[in-house]
């Protein structure tokens, strides 16, 4: 009986997610300004910004099952396994506040995550807007390292950027083949970048 109830809830959640307006998805390496721009855009659109980074930090602080599962990976600076993040997002986008749309910041980061999101969204997946913030690598290193760079910090920054190249860069091709990708120059004043992002999303109609 309990199993049937859980199955019913899961099915209802997926149905709700599929009926929601398609999300705006932010791609780009660490230091590209995704968090700031995603928050700005979500505020302008009047929809929630869903940040996996924020969700994981909250889970760690709460000491819940997700936090305990993710902690070893976060401590090493590694990407959290797909199944943990997919489960988090599946539950979050089924919430009522996502019915009119939402902005995804930090998800998907891998091809399996992108494929899982396609399944969650169903028919509305074709309406997703994917914004890829592009910033030169030298500028990313400068932003991430700060003025007081030491060897340990430098290695951690390089590790983050290499993770992006290995795990997330393939998503650019994934969404470009589907005609959903918009490349945005993130190496400009913040307001200019924001204006471009808003124009792209509003053109979706």
Image (cartoon, helix red, strand yellow):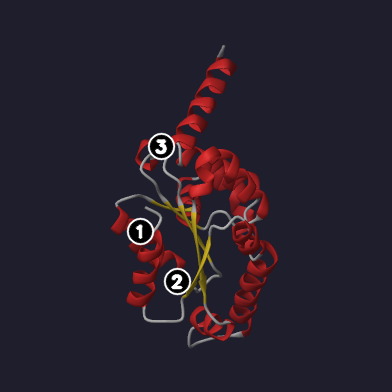
Local crowd size for mark 3, using a 10 Å CA cut-off: few (<14), some (14–19), many (≥20): few
- The answer to whether any part of residue 64 appears in the image is no
* Front residue of this view, candidates 181 and 164: 181
Q: Is residue 6 left or right of residue 94?
A: right
- Mark-to-mark CA distance, 2 and 3: 26 Å
Determine whether 184 is above or below 80 in the image: below
- Can you say whether 8 is above or below 100 in the image? above
Tag 3 secondary structure: loop
* Residue 30, image quadrant: bottom right
Alpha carbon distance from label 1 to label 2: 20 Å
Residue under the point 66% across and 67% down? 163
Could you say which disc has been placed on residue 52 in the image?
none
Residue 33 point in image, percent of width and height: 45, 71
Q: From the top left corner, tell me how far across and down residue 26 is, in percent.
A: 49, 61
Task: Write down the residue under mark 2.
Answer: 33
Sequence-first disc among 3 and 1: 3
Could you tell me which residue is drawn at 58 percent across and 82 percent down? 137
* Labels 1 and 2 touching (C-beta < 8 A): no
Q: Who comes first in sequence, dot 1 or dot 2?
A: 2
Badge number at residue 95: 3
Element type where label 1 sits in the image: helix
In front: mark 1 or mark 2? Answer: 1
Specify the quadrant of the image occupied by residue 103: bottom left
Q: Which residue is mark 1?
A: 202
């Amino acid at each position: 009986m309990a199993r049937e109830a859980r199955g019913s809830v899961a099915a209802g959640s997926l149905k709700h997610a599929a009926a929601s307006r398609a999300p705006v998805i932010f791609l780009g390496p660490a230091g590209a300004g995704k968090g700031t721009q995603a928050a700005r855009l979500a505020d302008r659109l009047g929809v929630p910004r869903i940040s996996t980074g924020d969700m994981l930090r909250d889970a760690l602080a709460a000491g819940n099952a997700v936090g305990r599962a993710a902690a070893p990976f976060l401590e090493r600076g590694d990407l959290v396994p797909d199944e943990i993040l997919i489960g988090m997002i599946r539950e979050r986008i089924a919430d009522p506040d996502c019915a009119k749309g939402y902005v995804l910041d930090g998800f998907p980061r891998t091809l399996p995550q992108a494929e899982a999101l396609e399944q969650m969204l169903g028919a509305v997946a074709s309406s997703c807007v994917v914004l890829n913030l592009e910033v030169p690598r030298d500028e990313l290193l400068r932003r991430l390292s700060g003025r007081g760079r030491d060897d340990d910090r430098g290695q951690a920054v390089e590790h983050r950027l290499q993770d992006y190249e290995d795990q997330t860069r393939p998503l650019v091709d994934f969404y470009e083949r589907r005609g959903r990708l918009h490349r945005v120059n993130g190496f400009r004043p913040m307001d200019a970048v924001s204006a471009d992002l808003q124009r792209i999303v509003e053109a979706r109609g």
